Image: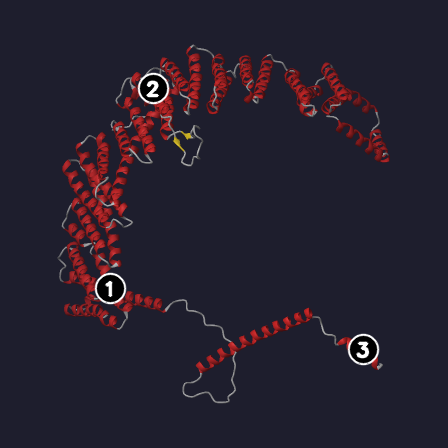
């Protein structure tokens, strides 16, 4: 190669890259250096770890030989962590050893005891017991606390065996129960002293506390004491446990004391309550009350001693209930059976005296809750009687107007028996109502409390006639007066609660209010009482008519007089009772149900007139709904007589049409049209008319007129919307009838009508008329030609139809494109029509 060529080529090969490219190359090299540095550092760390492990494993009697080659081993995985900790293993071993020694000691005492003499027995048991109880001392000095606990537990078990052995050998003639009482008391004292002397042990003190639950109870059982003494022993033990739980600082002892207090206290309270309930005289009741008073003092004392504890309200609540049970049991023993609940209620109400006293807040709150609980139980006792009084008169529905009962109790106890010993139920309800009204004379819950008080007072008044066995007339007058009073209270309590989050309103603007709980309560009570009154009145004809008339007038007067929330309810109730009065009046006159239906129609007509005059939306809606329900009742009454049913439907249609005159009730016009059509159909059916045109033409003609008027007002309306429904109603049923008709007048008339519809659709270029009329005309023509086609097909050879079908397919295939174009053109023509 020439020299110049080589030189020129070398100049081009040693060209320096641009700065950006050179910077990229430098960055890449630096990143590789960093990565390599990280690898080397990781290797260095691993090597250091290997060296340290090798030095730790080298023999202690001489250094490693200098210059000896190092032997590197592969890294080993970290050892698996033990599944059990050393203290846990130690505790398991100690517990297992103590259990085994205990079992051995019991086996020795029960099995091998008889092989030794008295001296040998005493020496063995004494030595073993002393050794077991003394061993924890040096063990504690050496810091072996767990071992000391196990050995101490064995020593405690041995003391029990010593007591058992002493009774079997030396004191076999002593009563076992009495000896057990003395032994458990002595063991409890010894164990407590042993635990106090060795304060580091945690087992002896709770064991002593658990053993202390038995001596007193075993002692009274050994003494042959009665139920009252045994119950007293349980309660005294509970008191001792309570004192220990409140005064001892050792947690384990306190836990055992709390469990003992609740256990023995619960058994003692249950036993004392049973004794109080079974007491047949004042003395027995007083002794049971003393026991209950002791239990109440224990509970209240614990709550008072620790008022900040979480259990303080519950303890004070329990103490209050036990106090009521004690005092009420004494009253029950001297009062008749019917006054048992009022006696307990009086004691419960007396607990309200703690309000505002110097007692701790938790104690006062618990006592108040106990009073509320007693009152709630008293009300629950009276509720079955209230249910009987409210639901019982419904039995008169099965024997309407069978005769007035002798008194008010017989009027309500028609299908359910009257509960015994419930004569004081009205007094109980009235007392709780008075407590509610007086206890919540102020505060945020005043309205709710007053509503509850009104409900209880209402129930008490409702029970009075039947409880006092007043005459039947008085049994009707009292619910009537209650209804009137409740309606008046609802009307005059129209002041409502203003919403708390109500936004600021302009000056002079009305406030946005809602009904108060008192208004809603009184209104609901008025409705329920009126229904109860109607059920009571079903026993006699005159009473039914008088009650229904009076209720209709009363609710109507309230609806006219007051214009707030109760107008909607009272107006609807007045119309409902008016409808019931119409039915009762017709039945009193021995009218047939379809004749009564005409009388009931006065109610929907009145409702329609009232709805047109009312201004408020809610009363208007309630009146219209009640009128609609009354109209359905009239239709149901007339259902068995088609001519009268047609008349009722027509009159309902007139009422609906009158309602549709109002601008805000235009939609009712559809219901009016449907009622008129139904009335026509029912009338035709009663005349035994079977032609479908008689049923469809009364629908078609108005529908076509409505469609014509709509297209005049809105030319953009589709012909299917305007005329499709009306034409379909007549053409389709007539076409179905024509296909099954063997005569010629119906097909001729239907074909003529279809031809006229088709011609009108063609002239006016209306799609619905053209399609419906033309389709009907084609089907009628096919129906008329069907016999001839069938006759011709019978004369034609069987090979002719397949041949004609093949020719048709060939012709269509040859002119396929032209046929598609013609079909598209027909579709476009129809599409341009409306």
Residue 696 horizontal/vertical position (percent) = 65, 18
Residue 325 horizontal/vertical position (percent) = 22, 39
Q: Which residue is mark 3?
A: 8
Disc 3 element:
helix
Q: Residue 533's quadrant in the figure?
A: top left
Viewport quadrant of the N terminus: bottom right
Left or right: 81, with 635 as reference point: left
Residue 7 against residue 373 in the figure, above or below? below
Dot 1 or dot 3: first in sequence order is 3
Q: Which residue is mark 1?
A: 106
Viewport quadrant of the C terminus: top right
Q: Residue 554's quadrant in the figure?
A: top left
Disc 2 element:
helix
Q: Residue at x 19, y 50 (%)?
A: 239
Residue 107 visible within the image? no
Q: Residue 132's quadrant in the figure?
A: bottom left
Q: Are marks 2 and 3 in contact (CB under 8 Å)?
A: no
Disc 1 element:
helix
Left or right: 801, with 476 as reference point: right
Which mark lies nearer to you, 1 or 3? 3
Q: Which residue is mark 2?
A: 480
Residue 452 against residue 756 in the figure, above or below? below
Residue 724 horizontal/vertical position (percent) = 68, 23
Q: Residues within 10 Å of mark 1 (few under 14, many from 20)?
A: some
202 or 706: nearer the viewer: 706
Q: Residues within 10 Å of mark 3 (few under 14, many from 20)?
A: few
């Amino acid at each position: 190669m020439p020299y110049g060529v080589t030189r020129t080529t070398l100049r081009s090969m040693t060209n320096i890259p641009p700065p950006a490219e050179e910077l990229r190359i430098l960055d890449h090299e630096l990143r590789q250096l960093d990565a390599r540095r990280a690898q080397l550092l990781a290797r260095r760390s691993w090597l250091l770890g290997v060296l340290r492990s090798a030095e730790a494993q080298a023999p202690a009697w001489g250094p490693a030989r200098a210059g000896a080659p190092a032997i590197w081993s592969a890294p080993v995985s970290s050892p698996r962590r033990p599944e059990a900790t050393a203290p846990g293993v130690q505790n398991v071993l100690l517990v297992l050893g103590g259990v085994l020694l205990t079992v051995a000691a019991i086996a020795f005492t029960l099995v091998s005891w008889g092989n030794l003499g008295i001296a040998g027995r005493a020496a063995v048991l004494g030595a073993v017991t002393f050794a077991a109880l003394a061993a924890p001392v040096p063990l504690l000095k050496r810091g072996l606390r767990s071992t000391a606990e196990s050995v101490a537990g064995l020593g405690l078990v041995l003391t029990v065996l010593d007591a058992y052995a002493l009774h079997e050998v030396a004191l076999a003639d002593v009563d076992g129960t009495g000896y057990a009482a003395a032994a458990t008391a002595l063991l409890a004292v010894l164990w407590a002293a042993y635990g106090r002397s060795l304060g580091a042990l945690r087992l002896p003190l709770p064991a002593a506390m658990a053993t202390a639950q038995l001596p007193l109870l075993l002692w009274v059982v050994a003494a042959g004491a009665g139920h009252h003494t045994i119950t007293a022993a349980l309660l005294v033990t509970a008191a001792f446990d309570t004192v220990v739980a409140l005064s001892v600082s050792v947690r384990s002892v306190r836990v055992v004391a709390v469990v003992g207090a609740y256990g023995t206290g619960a058994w003692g309270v249950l036993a004392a309550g049973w004794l109080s309930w079974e007491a047949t005289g004042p003395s027995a009741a007083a002794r049971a009350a003393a026991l209950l008073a002791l239990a109440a003092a224990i509970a209240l004392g614990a709550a008072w001693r620790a008022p900040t504890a979480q259990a303080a309200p519950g303890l004070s609540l329990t103490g209050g209930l036990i106090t009521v049970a004690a005092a009420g049991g004494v009253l029950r023993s001297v009062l008749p059976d019917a006054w048992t609940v009022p006696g307990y209620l009086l004691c419960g109400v007396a607990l309200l005296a703690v309000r505002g006293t110097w007692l701790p807040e938790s104690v006062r709150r618990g006592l108040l809750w106990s009073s509320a609980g007693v009152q709630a139980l008293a009300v629950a006792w009276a509720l079955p009687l209230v249910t009987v009084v409210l639901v019982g008169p419904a039995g008169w529905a099965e024997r309407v107007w069978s005769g007035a009962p002798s008194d008010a109790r017989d009027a309500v106890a028609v299908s359910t028996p009257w509960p015994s010993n419930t004569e004081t139920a009205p007094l109980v309800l009235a007392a709780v109502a008075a407590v509610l009204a007086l206890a919540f004379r102020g505060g945020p819950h005043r309205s709710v409390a007053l509503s509850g008080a009104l409900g209880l007072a209402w129930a008490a008044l409702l029970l009075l006639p039947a409880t006092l066995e007043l005459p039947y007339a008085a049994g009707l007058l009292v619910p009537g007066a209650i209804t009137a009073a409740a309606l008046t209270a609802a009307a005059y309590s129209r002041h409502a609660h203003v919403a708390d989050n109500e936004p600021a309103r302009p000056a002079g603007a009305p406030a946005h209010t809602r009904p108060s709980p008192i208004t809603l309560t009184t209104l609901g009570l008025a409705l329920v009482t009126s229904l109860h009154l109607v059920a009571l009145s079903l026993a006699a004809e005159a009473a039914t008519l008088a009650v229904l008339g009076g209720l209709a007038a009363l609710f109507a007067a309230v609806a006219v007089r007051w214009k707030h929330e109760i107008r909607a309810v009272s107006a609807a109730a007045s119309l409902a009772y008016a409808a019931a009065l119409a039915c009762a009046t017709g039945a009193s006159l021995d009218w047939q149900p379809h004749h009564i239906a005409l009388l009931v129609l006065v109610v929907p007509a009145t409702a329609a007139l009232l709805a047109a005059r009312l201004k408020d939306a809610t009363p208007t809606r309630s009146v219209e709904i009640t009128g609609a329900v009354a109209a359905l009742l009239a239709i149901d009454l007339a259902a068995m007589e088609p001519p009268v049913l047609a008349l009722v439907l027509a009159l309902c249609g007139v009422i609906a049409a009158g309602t549709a005159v109002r601008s805000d009730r235009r939609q009712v016009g559809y219901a009016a049209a449907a009622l008129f059509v139904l009335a026509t159909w029912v009338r035709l059916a009663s005349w035994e008319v079977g032609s479908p045109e008689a049923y469809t033409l009364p629908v078609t003609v108005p529908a076509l007129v409505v469609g014509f008027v709509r297209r005049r007002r809105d030319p953009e309306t589709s012909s299917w919307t305007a005329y499709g429904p009306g034409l379909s109603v007549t053409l389709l049923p007539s076409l179905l009838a024509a296909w099954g008709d063997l005569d010629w007048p119906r097909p001729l008339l239907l074909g003529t009508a279809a031809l006229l519809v088709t011609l009108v659709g063609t002239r006016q270029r209306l799609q619905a008329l053209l399609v419906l009329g033309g389709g009907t005309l084609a089907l009628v023509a096919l129906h008329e030609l069907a016999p001839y086609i069938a006759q011709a097909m019978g004369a034609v050879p069987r090979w002719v139809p397949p041949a004609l079908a093949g020719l048709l397919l060939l012709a269509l295939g040859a002119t396929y494109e032209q046929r598609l174009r013609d079909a598209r053109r027909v579709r476009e023509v129809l599409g341009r029509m409306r």
